[in-house]
Amino acid sequence: MLTQRALLRRCFHDRPTTEEQEREHDDRFCRQADAFTYALALYGEDAIGFAAAYRPTITYRGRAIRLGGLGDVCTDPGRRRSGIATAVVRAAVTELQAAECDLAYPCTDVTNPGMVRLYGQLGFVPLSRPHSYLGKSGTLCRPPRQ
């Protein structure tokens, strides 16, 4: 039986390894413990696809914004290119819509054409310029230079 946790380890083997990397990762990104719902694809008892949905409330120009986030999207490597990622992302987006998020933001690599295609099927478009945001610590986070 392939569990959700084992699937995530299989897909995201390059997780932070040092304490400093872990702190930076926790500051910059939502953690699974912060998710309000998950979409999980099963084949028998095996987890073969996963997506997490987040909905933190942030303040922008003095206004509370419910930010919908998508992350930890993965498909078992042996089952990729079969629509599983699209299905779990679509299910997670449905949950974000039901939660009445003001906007949704997928946490993904927009230099990866496969990710742009996946999210593009659901109406997401890459920002036309780099962006920055404040991490949980209040530190300004910028995307890595290409």
Image: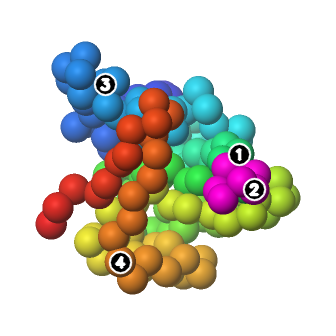
User: Of the residues shown, which amino acid type is indicated by label 4?
Assistant: Arg
Earlier sequence position, callout 2 versus callout 1: 1
Q: Which is the main secondary structure of the residues drawn in magenta?
A: strand
Rate crowding at label 1 as few (under 14), some (14 to 19) or many (20 or more) other CA atoms within 10 Å: some
Q: Residue at x 74, y 64 (%)?
A: 102
Q: Nearer the viewer, residue 52 or 26?
A: 26
Q: Which residue is mark 4?
A: 129
Q: CA distance from mark 4 to mark 2?
A: 23 Å
Image location (x, y in percent) of residue 55 = 69, 47
Q: Which mark is residue 63?
A: 2
Earlier sequence position, callout 3 versus callout 2: 3
Q: Which residue is mark 3?
A: 22
Under circle 2, the secondary element is strand
* Residue at the extreme left: 146
User: Of the residues shown, which amino acid type is indicated by label 3?
Assistant: Glu
Magenta extent: 59-64
**Image quarter for residue 80?**
bottom left
Quadrant of the image containing the C terminus: bottom left
In the image, residue 8 sits, relative to residue 80, either above or below, namely above
User: Of the residues shown, which amino acid type is indicated by label 2?
Assistant: Arg
Image location (x, y in percent) of residue 123 = 59, 81
